[in-house]
Image (cartoon, grey):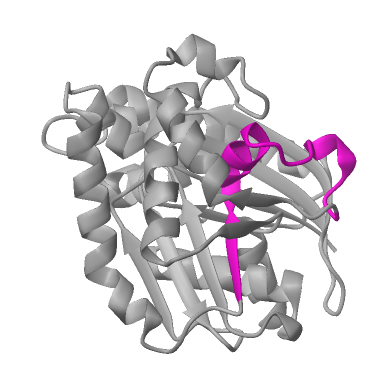
């Protein structure tokens, strides 16, 4: 069946149209993305501004039309950190659903981690053993670990690349202050993750990690999804130092970096390096599947 998965993230709205069936991998048929930057449309009281709501509603209407044009019979729509954090979240969701006819749902942070873990497990299979999965989004960092299809621990921390850029670097705080903040937050939670044992395979997903891996020498997307891609801590640590003196324009010219995310790569790199250090990881393998695929797979399992 042809289905649409609509992901409303802190940075981007992304509709993925797939041909899906139980017992086989979903095959991407079409993609429709729009940089929404919703996290930047939260006011001082953490309410989403009228402009932010308007941008989201407009995109949701367009995404539904796009999905229907491509023949989708089902659209799974969900929102993550920026919408979840808004104090007027109920009003935002009601506005989107009334205008678009969608059934947009808000995912809790632990559910983000759990569903991303499911996608990674299905991609690598049982031979991966105990998985550790890391995902840096615009608003939050998700970490999950376990040896089954459901993780035995699934955490979400307010350490997204966009959030930290806005609240720390753009606010004039130093790299050293941000580094300490990030490492103390991850360290507070690391024991819960490692209580079940170390990882047989450590994996990273989503755009920030893909961009960091590409900058550090991983194969470009044009070589296909089945090429093994890794992010090595040694290369990442060198990149963190380089980014301290680079402007967003300079970063935007690096391989694998989109212009709309260039300003937050530095914060993302600080989080990634901290996670690798604190979990004693020399490398992270990049998985092409992430939250959207996890939402789709869970839906297919329930049919």
Relative to residue 195, is residue 50 depicted above or below?
A: above
Please tell me which residue lies in front, 186 or 35. Answer: 186
Q: Nearer the viewer, residue 51 or 292?
A: 292
In the rendered view, tell whether residue 135 sits above or below residue 99. below
Write down the region rendered in magenta: 201-226
Residue at 37% x, 41% y: name it: 270
Q: Is residue 76 magenta?
A: no
Tell me residue 105's x, y (percent). Answer: 45, 58
**The furthest residue to the left:** 45
Q: Quadrant of the C terminus?
A: bottom right
* Position of residue 97 in the picture relative to residue 282 (left or right): left
3 left or right of 272 in image: right
Q: Position of residue 134 (x, y in %)?
A: 49, 61
x then y, percent, for residue 5: 65, 53
Q: Residue at x 63, y 36 (%)?
A: 216
Q: How many marks?
A: 0
On whether residue 225 falls in the magenta region, the answer is: yes
**Residue 235 shown left or right of residue 79 in the figure:** right
Q: Is residue 37 visible?
A: no
Res 80 visible: yes
Q: Quadrant of the N terminus?
A: bottom right
**Relative image position of residue 170 (x, y in whole percent):** 25, 22
Q: Residue at x 52, y 50 (%)?
A: 233
Is residue 35 positioned above or below 134 on the image?
above
Quarter-wise, where is residue 292 in the image? Answer: bottom right
Snapshot quadrant of residue 149: bottom right
Left or right of residue 274, residue 68 in this image: right
């Amino acid at each position: 069946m042809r289905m649409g998965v609509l992901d409303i993230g802190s940075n981007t709205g992304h509709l993925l149209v797939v041909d899906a069936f139980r017992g086989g991998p979903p095959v991407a048929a079409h993609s429709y993305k729009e940089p929404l930057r919703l996290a930047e449309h939260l006011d001082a009281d953490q309410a989403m501004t009228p402009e932010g709501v308007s941008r989201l509603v407009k995109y949701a209407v367009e995404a539904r039309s796009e999905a229907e044009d491509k023949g989708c019979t089902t659209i799974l729509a969900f929102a993550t950190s920026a919408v979840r954090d808004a104090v007027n979240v109920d009003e935002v969701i009601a506005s989107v659903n009334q205008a678009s006819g969608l059934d947009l749902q808000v995912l809790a942070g632990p559910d983000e981690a759990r569903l991303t873990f499911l996608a990674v497990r299905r991609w690598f299979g049982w031979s991966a053993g105990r998985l550790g999965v890391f995902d840096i989004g615009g608003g939050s960092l998700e970490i999950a670990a376990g040896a089954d299809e459901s993780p035995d621990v699934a955490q979400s921390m307010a350490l997204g690349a966009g959030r930290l850029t806005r609240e720390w670097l753009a606010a004039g705080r130093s790299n050293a202050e941000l580094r300490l903040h990030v490492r103390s937050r991850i360290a507070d939670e690391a024991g819960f993750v490692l209580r079940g044992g170390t990882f047989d395979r450590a994996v990273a997903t989503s755009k920030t990690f893909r961009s960091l891996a590409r900058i550090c020498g991983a194969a470009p997307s044009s070589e296909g999804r089945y090429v093994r891609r890794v992010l090595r801590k040694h290369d990442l640590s060198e990149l963190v130092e380089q980014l301290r003196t680079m402007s967003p324009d300079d970063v935007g010219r690096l391989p694998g970096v989109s212009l709309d995310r260039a300003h937050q790569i530095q914060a993302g790199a600080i989080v990634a390096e901290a996670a690798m250090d604190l979990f004693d990881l020399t490398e992270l393998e990049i998985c092409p599947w992430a939250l959207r695929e996890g939402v789709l797979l869970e839906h297919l399992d329930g049919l």
